[in-house]
Image (tube, helix red, strand yellow):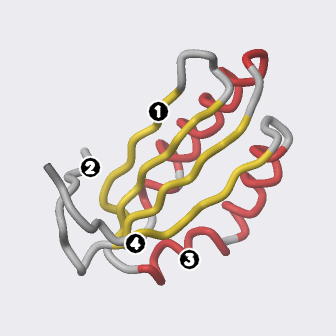
Amino acid sequence: MPNIAINPDIQTVVTTFETSPGACQDLLDALQDAYATFISKQPGFIAAGLHVNDAQTRIANYSQWAKRDDFLAMLRSSEMRRRNREISELCRSFEPVLYDVAATY
């Protein structure tokens, strides 16, 4: 479970997926499978959460990694490159952005 706190030793990644209501569940299924069978088992993975908006046109993914390089290694793996090709067919766009937590309340 993600723990949102100021911690310079943790890499936070927020990825937004723009999709359609007709493809939202398929995209969510693909992301859940990726986390359950591959991503969560990668070195440095800490936690993640998937969020779907009411209109089912966006999925937001919040993930935490021990190091930036752990996330990048997972992203560059042949398994994840294959999965990302499949995921890209289910959405108009997606973009992972690396963040540092600046404040919590």
| Residue at (35, 71) in percent of width and height | 100
Q: Tell me which numbered mark, 4 or 3, is placed earlier along the sequence.
A: 4
Amino acid type at circle 1 is: His
- In space, the residues marked 1 and 3 are separated at their CA atoms by 22 Å
The residue at which mark 4 appears reads as: 43
Amino acid type at circle 2 is: Pro
The residue at which mark 3 appears reads as: 72
The residue at which mark 2 appears reads as: 2
Q: Nearer the viewer, residue 74 or 48?
A: 48
Mark 1 touches mark 2? (CB < 8 Å):
no
* Label 4 vs label 3, nearer the camera: 3
Labelled disc at residue 51: 1
Q: Tell me which numbered mark, 2 or 4, is placed earlier along the sequence.
A: 2
Q: Determine whether 24 is above or below 47 in the image.
A: above
- In space, the residues marked 2 and 4 are separated at their CA atoms by 16 Å
Q: Position of residue 98 (x, y in %)?
A: 49, 70
* Label 1 vs label 4, nearer the camera: 1
* Label 2 vs label 4, nearer the camera: 2
**Label 4: element kind:** loop
- In space, the residues marked 1 and 2 are separated at their CA atoms by 13 Å
Q: Position of residue 31 (x, y in %)?
A: 59, 40
Mark 2 touches mark 4? (CB < 8 Å):
no
Q: Is residue 14 left or right of residue 89?
A: left
Q: Tell me which numbered mark, 1 or 3, is placed earlier along the sequence.
A: 1
Q: Tell me which numbered mark, 1 or 2, is placed earlier along the sequence.
A: 2
**Label 3: element kind:** helix
- In space, the residues marked 2 and 3 are separated at their CA atoms by 19 Å
